[in-house]
Image: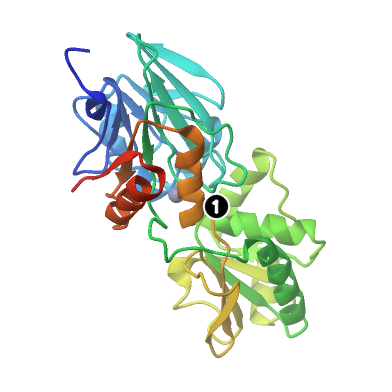
Amino acid sequence: MGGKGLTANAVVTQRGAVLLGDSVACDAFDETRPLRVVTHAHADHLIGLSRSLRSCEKVLMTTATRDLTRVMNGQLALNDGSVEILDYGETIEYGEERVTFAKANHILGAAQVLVEDADDKRVAYTGDFKLDGTQPLLDCDVLVVEATYGSPSFRRSFELDVEELLVSMVEKRLRRGTVYVFGYHGKLQEVMQILHRADVSVPFVMPERVFRVSKVCEQHGMQLGCLALSTENEGKELLDGNLPCVAFYHMNSRGSVGLDGSRICVSGWEFHSPCRQIGDKEHLVALSDHSDFNGLIEYVRRCKPKRVVTDNYRVSHGVTLAREISKRLGISAVAMPK
Ligand SMILES: [Zn+2]
């Protein structure tokens, strides 16, 4: 390894690339790495993807992430020959290194990444994840961990009741007509699945992009209910008449859609109660697809790395999380980039 210490095996660059071992760059383009990994289809993990497609030898992602990326990032055709599918539990060899994906519970297709070298040194990156449902956790020597809720103030104690609460809120509001749900791609489909499982059987109405993401989720086994486009007659009539249906819109449309209706925003950024009123007829429901602070610490505690790097590029809590990991677990930890 040319005298490299453990630190050299995992770096988060100033441009957000998570470098693992000698050949892999995750979630942003890096000109020194022949392999690009896309852990999942959220925009802050697709950085520089078109450059990676042009200049990397391989761009690795799960089948579901490829399908979602096509829809969510419409301008990228992904028909480039460099895309190579790597599904959960599969390993690809490159030079002396082996790259393996494991499931991360975040959005459909999300993966954790493990890179092992010829000396069986193991470097891993969690990607975005919620501890519950993420398995296997990756035993490793060096771990890069996401840090979205990396501060001790980001702890939830109410997680288990949230889905039930969401269902009863929607059911109650449907008696007065259309219920609008705002959230990010992936999260919206999770809400559809929760409502469908709870036998909320009204139509789910949505604009084109949300509809296409939902169709990909269905193709990959999620059951979402009866979906209608907001731009077609059935959907239009339901929305115009304020009839009982659930309308699903991306968070970006929150300021322009369903302003007079019952509104529910689903977001992880709420820690004190599972539900909070944020407007006249608007509530925020704390449905998160990230680990809270306790989940992040628990992941590190269980996989016992010798050293941890916190991702300080995508959020600003990496420094706090690194400090807490050192303090609570006695494991050397550093935030990157500085
Ligand atoms: Zn994400």
Q: Nearer the viewer, residue 177 or 330?
A: 330
Is 293 situated left or right of 285 in this image?
Answer: left
Q: Position of residue 45 (x, y in %)?
A: 37, 44
Q: Nearer the viewer, residue 154 or 66?
A: 154
Residue occupying the point 29% across, 58% down: 316
Q: From where the camera sits, is residue 282 visible? A: yes
| Crowd tier of the residue under label 1, counting other residues whose Cα lies within 10 Å: few below 14, some 14–19, many 20 or above | many
Describe the colour scheme in one phrase. Answer: rainbow
Q: Quadrant of the N terminus?
A: top left
Q: Nearer the viewer, residue 210 or 105?
A: 105
Q: How many marks on residues? A: 1
Mark 1: amino acid: Gly
Q: Dividing the picture into quarters, in which one does residue 144 lie?
A: top left
Is 169 situated left or right of 99 in this image?
Answer: right
Q: Position of residue 156 (x, y in %)?
A: 54, 64
Q: Dividing the picture into quarters, in which one does residue 18 lie?
A: top left
Query: Element type at marker 1?
Result: loop
Determine whether 291 is above or below 231 in the image: above
Residue occupying the point 64% across, 72% down: 236
Is 157 situated left or right of 298 in this image?
Answer: right
Residue occupying the point 78% across, 82% down: 175
Q: From where the camera sits, is residue 291 visible? A: no
- The residue labelled by disc 1 is 186
Q: Position of residue 29 (x, y in %)?
A: 26, 35
Determine whether 54 is above or below 166 in the image: above
Q: Nearer the viewer, residue 68 or 334?
A: 334
Question: For the residue with label 1, is its CB less than 8 Å from the closest atom of ligand 1?
Answer: yes
Q: Position of residue 286 (x, y in %)?
A: 56, 68
Determine whether 127 is above or below 121 in the image: below
